[in-house]
Image (cartoon, rainbow, N blue to C red):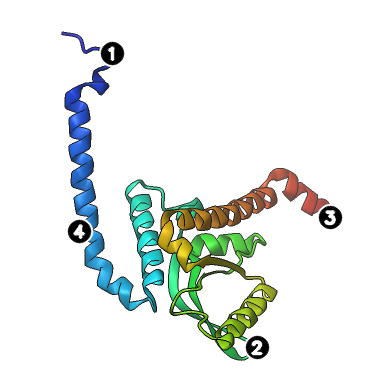
Amino acid sequence: MALRDDWHNCDLVMRNIEEASSHCADVFKSNLLKILPSLRSKCESPIEAVFLFWWVSFQHLFDSAGMSDDGPYAWTLVPQQDVIMNGTVYRVDFEVVPRSSERAARLRDCGFEIPRMAVELDGHDFHERTKEQVAYRNTRDRLLQGAGWKVLHFSGSEVARDPSSCLHDLLDVVHRVWEAGLAHELRVSSPVASNSSKQD
């Protein structure tokens, strides 16, 4: 007997999609719970742990879908990163770095320097409780931005209310950086660009 054209909408298929999704969600949750202690040890506040936990969740989804080699998915977060500026050590909550050092090196070789990027989570109980902490943050940000860094700030209430949206905003930024790098690489490697440089 020939299959109906709408067989993919039948109760059997739809029921098993639900069951498979539920099973995968349970396995995913179990795996995330296993790495929770290591995430907690890398963070200095619950908000930072939430942000990193969501990033790791996104990264697992990208990896399972085979989407982690390029674009906004080819990045990772390094928590509590120390940065030396003008002889002073400053700390950022997270630095966003390419997962592939080879790809980053290739972009540098063609003349595109990937900007360093920092993520700061503001306004919760562990940050900015005093005027000195606010002054420290502002000084650090000015120095980082003056050195070419991109510094993204999210409030603690934003992360607590809608962490997924915060992650999407971050992914939009790194996607634009990556696309700019690939566009530069394409321009300098194109025959027109090569001929132009030879004529110069």
Q: Which of the two discs, 4 and 1, labels the residue nearer the N terminus?
A: 1
Q: Which of the two discs, 4 and 2, labels the residue nearer the N terminus?
A: 4
Residue 181 occupies which quadrant of the picture?
Answer: bottom right
Vertical arrangement, residue 79 with respect to residue 159, above or below:
below
Task: Please count the marks in the image.
Answer: 4
Q: Judge from the rendering whether residue 2 lies leftward or rightward of residue 109; answer left or right.
A: left
| Quarter the N terminus occupies | top left
Q: What element carries label 3?
A: loop
Q: Is mark 2 on a helix, strand or loop?
A: loop
Q: Which residue type does callout 4 highlight?
A: Ser
Q: Judge from the rendering whether residue 42 lies leftward or rightward of residue 32; answer left or right.
A: right
Label 3 and label 4: CA atoms lie apart by: 60 Å
Residue 99 seen? no
Circles 2 and 1, Cβ within 8 Å, touching? The answer is: no
Question: Mark 3 packing: few (<14 Cα in 10 Å), some, or many (20+)?
Answer: few
**Residue bearing the label numbered 2:** 86
**Residue bearing the label numbered 4:** 30
Where residue 33 appears, as percent x and y from the top left, is 23, 64
Q: Which of the two discs, 3 and 2, labels the residue nearer the N terminus?
A: 2
